[in-house]
Each structure stands twice: as structure tokens, then as C-alpha cells.
Image (cartoon, rainbow, N blue to C red):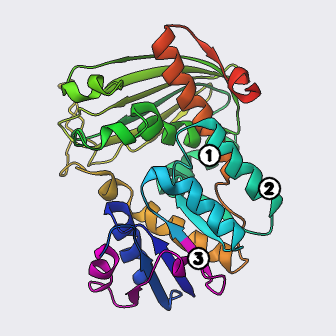
Amino acid sequence: MRISLVGSGIIGAAHATRLDSMPRVTELLLADFVDGRAAELAARLTKARAVTVDEAFDPGLDGVVITAKTSRHAELLHRALDARLPVFCEKPIALDIETTRAVVEHAARVPDVPVQIGFQRRFDAGYTRAKAAYEGGALGFVHTLRATTFDHEPPSAAYVPTSGGLFKDCASHDFDAIRWLTGREAVSLYAVGSNMGESYFGENGDVDSGSAIVTYDDGMVAVVSASRNNGAGHDVRLELHGSEGGRFVGLDDRAPLVTAEAVLSWQQAEPYLIYHERFEDAYVAELAHFLDVIEGRSSTACTPAEALEALYLAEACVRSVATGRPVRIAELRAE
């Protein structure tokens, strides 16, 4: 397959390296909006060459991967849909509901063009096993979930203004994972946030730690917490507590946890320090799935409409923190 990739930054370089190693990818065409960056990346790979952004949307290609900065995602998704190219795009589609909806509507007009949004936790082995346990009834009814996304260290000050904030950048992964895993729809949420670390978060209207209590349509409650300040290591976990049992995703020997109980010895390996380490296998699996979709062997794992649902909850968090009030998700859907 001939695949193009637009955006050769950190996530783009990582995805390009993964695609370059896949036997089904015969040629990788790299483009970037920064002069020379795609060529520099291509020189480090075996199947890659640099092209212009226009060439990356040649309808003769088999697919395109979008890893440019967030502000360009929607624009590039529209280009891929116009070219009728199967497209994988890193999340989010956009940081606002209106722009995201426009992509959802465009994709609905060309349903034969696959669009996959990069929520990689759907491809993590632990999340997949937890989903199987939930769907198989092993947990009974699930009454409580606890989701954790704690970064090892805060991003740079330059990153924060365009990140969308803690809830859209980090917690959106949890919102998508919970909806995918349980099949339940969020009804309302109440969120809080604070700034206890670097001052540049607050200066940009963001928080560096926050939590949301989310109520779902079956009565289930999820507590979703995110932070930029977890010096012990990168900590991503999901707990499911049910009437018949529970499941704990991410509770392995690299989880940055220390027990306070004297009777338990926690033999811990080196903790994860960055999300690429924690989810490397999932990143590979989601790209392999995209190739399966191109070949017609699988249906798209995460559609634009599903990505919009995660954005509704993240936006509700922003509004709840700002107003100090709960937010009903139906209000956002109705806007």
C-alpha cells in the first residue's frame, strides 16, 4: 500500500516509523508544513520520501494519515474526504464543537470513505480484556468506574495555548474509552480543576489537575481524573467496579504506585515516563487496523461521530469548571 502522512512532528515521526516497519506499506510519502522536516524524517526511514502537502492527497494513494498540529486536523480531514481517500487522523478533530460537527457531517455524505480517529486506548490489550469481561457479564452490573490519566511531567509552556486544555487533551481519551467499553451514554457531569504546578497553565486559562464526576444513562458513575504533575511516572489506569467483580486496567509492574500496606510487597519495574512507552503496542495495533480498513477487512474503529461524543464531555468539563455547575450533555448536543 502507498500511504501518505501529513505532519512530521513528535507523533507524526512515531507513526511514520511504525508504518515504515509494516510489510503491507510499500511506500510512505511524508509531507509537512515546515520546510525540510519531512525530508529529514524520510532520510531516517527505509520506504519514505518527502512530498508536498498537495501530493499527499493524491487520489491515487491508498490512504492518508494526519498527524499535523491540531488546528489543521479539520482542514486536512475535509481534503481527504474530498479526495475520497481513506484517512486516519490523530485526535481531536478540532477543539470546538462546530468545527468537529462539520467534519462529522462531511463524512456522513461520503460513507464509503473510511475515517478513523486516533483514540488508541481502544487497541490496548488491558482495555480490550476489560471490555470483554464487561460485555460477558463477569462483572455483574458496573456501578463505578475510576479513570486516571496522569502525565509524568508537564508539557512545555509553548504547547499549552494550542492544546485545548487538560480535559480536551488528556481526559478525552478516558471519555472515549469508557463509552466504547461500556456502550453507555453520559447524561451529566460536574468537573473541578486547579493549578498547583507551573503558572503558565493558569495564565492560559487552563488547569494542571482536574476531575469530573460523570453520570451515565444506566446510573453508572465514573470519576475521571487527569493531571500534568505525576513525577513518579506516566500513570494511565481504569478501574471497573461491579456487583459481581472488578477489573483494573494498567495495574502492572510499571504502574508508578507504592503501597502503604506492610503486608504487601510491590515488585515494580521502571515506570513509564511517556505515553509512547505506555501505549506503543496500541499505537501499532490502531495503524494496523487502519490498513485492515483500507483493505476492506474491518470496519472503522472510531468514527468522527464517536470522536464528537468525547468532545462533548471534554467541553462540558471546561464549562463546569468555569461556572461551578453541573452540565447536562444534552445541552451541548442541542447547540
Which marked residue is nearer to the observer: mark 1 or mark 2?
2
Tell me the residue at 30%/78% (across/down).
41
Label whose residue precedes the other's in the sequence (2 or 3): 3
Q: Is residue 206 above or below residue 22?
A: above
Image spot of residue 190 (x, y percent): 53, 15
Can residue 179 be seen by looking at this rendering?
no
Q: Say what secondary structure mark 2 lies in.
A: helix
Q: Which mark is residue 57?
A: 3
Q: Say what secondary structure mark 1 lies in.
A: helix
| Amino acid on which disc 3 is placed | Phe
Q: CA distance from mark 1 to mark 2?
A: 14 Å
Q: Residues within 10 Å of mark 1 (few under 14, many from 20)?
A: many
Q: CA distance from mark 1 to mark 3?
A: 23 Å
| Amino acid on which disc 1 is placed | Ala
Side (left or right) of 82 relative to 133 = right
Label whose residue precedes the other's in the sequence (1 or 3): 3
| Amino acid on which disc 2 is placed | Ala
Image spot of residue 160 (x, y percent): 31, 38
The magenta segment is 36-64
* For the residues bearing labels 2 and 3, Cβ distance under 8 angstroms: no
Q: Which mark is residue 108?
A: 2
Badge 1 is on which residue? 307
Side (left or right) of 237 relative to 298 = left
* For the residues bearing labels 1 and 3, Cβ distance under 8 angstroms: no
Image spot of residue 274 (x, y percent): 27, 51
Tell me the residue at 62%/32% (across/down).
312
Which marked residue is nearer to the observer: mark 1 or mark 3?
3
